[in-house]
Amino acid sequence: MTSRWVTCAGWFLLLTTVIAIELRARVRPSRYATLGETVAVVLRIPLVRGLALAGWSWLGWHLFVR
Protein backbone atom coordinates (compact mmCIF):
# COMPACT_ATOMS: atom_id res chain seq x y z
CA MET A 1 0.00 0.00 0.00
CA THR A 2 1.15 3.48 -0.74
CA SER A 3 1.10 6.21 1.84
CA ARG A 4 -1.80 7.85 0.00
CA TRP A 5 -4.00 4.78 0.56
CA VAL A 6 -3.02 4.62 4.21
CA THR A 7 -3.91 8.30 4.63
CA CYS A 8 -7.26 7.85 2.86
CA ALA A 9 -8.03 4.78 4.97
CA GLY A 10 -7.22 6.73 8.14
CA TRP A 11 -9.53 9.61 7.17
CA PHE A 12 -12.27 7.12 6.24
CA LEU A 13 -11.91 5.40 9.60
CA LEU A 14 -12.08 8.75 11.42
CA LEU A 15 -15.17 9.83 9.47
CA THR A 16 -16.89 6.49 10.05
CA THR A 17 -16.19 6.71 13.78
CA VAL A 18 -17.58 10.26 14.02
CA ILE A 19 -20.74 9.25 12.13
CA ALA A 20 -21.23 6.19 14.36
CA ILE A 21 -20.84 8.26 17.54
CA GLU A 22 -23.25 10.90 16.21
CA LEU A 23 -25.87 8.27 15.34
CA ARG A 24 -25.53 6.70 18.77
CA ALA A 25 -25.98 10.12 20.38
CA ARG A 26 -29.13 10.71 18.33
CA VAL A 27 -30.58 7.34 19.37
CA ARG A 28 -29.88 7.89 23.09
CA PRO A 29 -29.92 11.68 23.57
CA SER A 30 -30.08 11.53 27.37
CA ARG A 31 -26.90 9.45 27.61
CA TYR A 32 -24.60 10.84 24.90
CA ALA A 33 -23.95 14.36 23.62
CA THR A 34 -24.22 15.12 19.92
CA LEU A 35 -21.33 16.62 17.98
CA GLY A 36 -22.99 20.04 17.95
CA GLU A 37 -23.48 20.02 21.72
CA THR A 38 -19.88 18.96 22.27
CA VAL A 39 -18.52 21.70 19.99
CA ALA A 40 -20.70 24.31 21.72
CA VAL A 41 -19.31 23.36 25.13
CA VAL A 42 -15.70 23.29 23.92
CA LEU A 43 -16.00 26.66 22.15
CA ARG A 44 -17.00 28.36 25.41
CA ILE A 45 -13.28 28.43 26.27
CA PRO A 46 -11.77 31.64 24.80
CA LEU A 47 -8.41 30.03 23.96
CA VAL A 48 -10.10 27.22 22.02
CA ARG A 49 -12.31 29.74 20.24
CA GLY A 50 -9.22 31.69 19.17
CA LEU A 51 -7.47 28.53 17.99
CA ALA A 52 -10.56 27.54 16.00
CA LEU A 53 -10.64 30.97 14.36
CA ALA A 54 -6.94 30.74 13.53
CA GLY A 55 -7.44 27.25 12.09
CA TRP A 56 -10.36 28.31 9.91
CA SER A 57 -8.39 31.36 8.74
CA TRP A 58 -5.40 29.22 7.84
CA LEU A 59 -7.58 26.70 6.01
CA GLY A 60 -9.42 29.42 4.12
CA TRP A 61 -6.20 31.13 3.11
CA HIS A 62 -4.61 27.95 1.81
CA LEU A 63 -7.65 26.53 0.04
CA PHE A 64 -9.67 29.46 -1.25
CA VAL A 65 -7.26 32.34 -1.88
CA ARG A 66 -5.04 30.56 -4.36
Image (cartoon, rainbow, N blue to C red):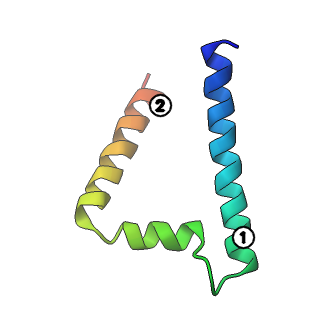
Location of the C terminus by quadrant is: top left
User: In this rendering, is residue 54 above or below 64?
Assistant: below
Element type where label 1 sits in the image: helix
Sort mark 1 into few (<14), some (14-19) or many (20+) by Cα contacts within 10 Å.
some
Q: Determine the residue positioned at 36% across, 66% down.
A: 43
Determine the residue located farthest toward the left in the rendered image: 47
* Left/right of residue 15 with respect to residue 51 in the rendered view: right
Residue beneath label 2, please?
A: 64
Q: Determine the residue positioned at 30% across, 59% down.
A: 48
* Left/right of residue 44 with respect to residue 9 in the rendered view: left
What's under tag 2, amino acid-wise? Phe
Q: Which mark is residue 43?
A: none
Location of the N terminus by quadrant is: top right
Element type where label 2 sits in the image: helix
On the image, the x and y values in percent for residue 62 come to 41, 28
Determine the residue located farthest toward the front in the rendered image: 1
Sort mark 2 into few (<14), some (14-19) or many (20+) by Cα contacts within 10 Å.
few
Determine the residue located farthest toward the top in the rendered image: 2
Of the two numbered discs 1 and 2 in the rendering, the one whose residue sits closer to the viewer: 1
Q: Determine the residue positioned at 66% across, 28% down.
A: 8
Residue beneath label 1, please?
A: 24
On the image, the x and y values in percent for residue 31 come to 62, 83
* Left/right of residue 52 with respect to residue 10 in the rendered view: left
What's under tag 1, amino acid-wise? Arg
The numbered mark, 1 or 2, whose residue comes first in the sequence reads: 1
* Left/right of residue 39 with respect to residue 3 in the rendered view: left
User: In this rendering, is residue 12 above or below 26?
Assistant: above
Occupied quadrant, residue 55 = top left
On the image, the x and y values in percent for residue 65 come to 42, 28
User: In this rendering, is residue 54 above or below 43?
Assistant: above
On the image, the x and y values in percent for residue 40 come to 44, 71
How far apart marks 1 and 2 lie (CA) works out to 34 Å
